[in-house]
Image (spheres, helix red, strand yellow):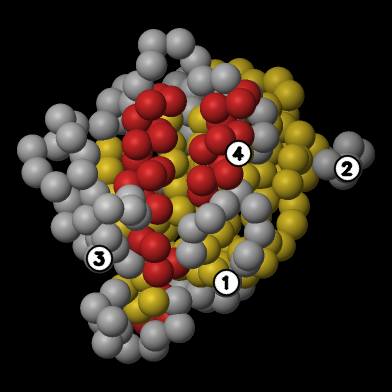
Amino acid sequence: MERSKVQVLYDACNAVFSQKKLPSFQQIQWLKSILDLFEAVDVGIDEFSLHGRSIKGLVCGQAVSEITYIHIHECDSFSIGVFCFPAGVTFPLHDHPGMTVLSKLLYGSLYVKAYDWVKVQKSSCRINGIAGMVVDAILNAPCEPSILFPKSGGNIHSFTALTPCAILDVLSPPYSEERPSTYFSDFPIPSLPGYAILEEIDIPQDLVVSGAPYLGPPVDFGDDETEMLV
């Protein structure tokens, strides 16, 4: 029986991220090549449907009214999930502490702004510093997956959905109580084009992320979870 794309992705992530040593460049590129094959339907999303659940029994991409996360898998080593966005919504500037993140825009158009630290300091339990802009661009699906690393690739980023869109994310390791996300405001430096001062802020009160069930093909997680996700 042929494995689904989600099963292939899970098996590959489990092989790469569950090892004790850091993944190699070749392994990360292998995961990127797997992500590049994905379309919305592969994770249970009908990107064209407008009303509720589609006649195909999938999540309706055009009907999402707020930022919505579809959980597929999470363990100590990595997580797999999909963020769906309605047009006009922004996911504010945030970081990924100590993480490697692979992302694939499944459909739609997305404005991405991303920074890496140049100089960072902590004071009074707050983080601030100077960061260099790495990405300031509009992404249109289909496009190749992006990769960010703990200290490069645009570890601090924000998204603005220009149309309804969805992003398939792989995070390693995933967020946790010991590894929370930090949110920032950015203030461009007029005398240094491409650089900005980032200042930590509280989680924006208007940031709402709802959940939706995974409606894609069944995934066998082996010993990681007590039962198959269907």
Q: Report the residue at 29% width, 63% height from top.
A: 216
Q: Is residue 221 above or below residue 42?
A: above
Q: Amino acid at mark 1?
A: Gly
Q: Which disc, if any, is residue 216? A: none
Q: Quadrant of residue 184?
A: top right
Q: Residue furthest top?
A: 21
Q: Which disc, if any, is residue 193? A: 2
Q: Amino acid at mark 2?
A: Pro
Q: Nearer the viewer, mark 2 or mark 3?
A: 3
Q: Report the residue at 45% width, 11% height from top.
A: 21
Q: Is residue 69 visible?
A: no
Q: Nearer the viewer, mark 4 or mark 2?
A: 4
Is 68 or 47 nearer to us in this picture?
47
> Would you name the residue on which mark 4 appears?
147
- Where is residue 145 shown, x and y percent of the image? 60, 49
Q: CA distance from mark 4 to mark 3?
A: 26 Å
Q: Is residue 124 above or below residue 144?
A: above
Q: Which sits earlier in the primary sequence, circle 1 or circle 2? A: 1
Residue density around tag 1, few if under 14, some if 14–19, many if 20 or more, within 10 Å? many
Q: Amino acid at mark 4?
A: Ile
Which secondary structure, mark 3?
Answer: loop
Q: CA distance from mark 2 to mark 3?
A: 45 Å
Residue density around tag 3, few if under 14, some if 14–19, many if 20 or more, within 10 Å? some
Q: Which sits earlier in the primary sequence, circle 4 or circle 2? A: 4
Q: Which disc, if any, is residue 215? A: 3
Quadrant of the frame with the C terminus: bottom left
Q: CA distance from mark 1 to mark 3?
A: 20 Å
Q: Which sits earlier in the primary sequence, circle 4 or circle 1? A: 1
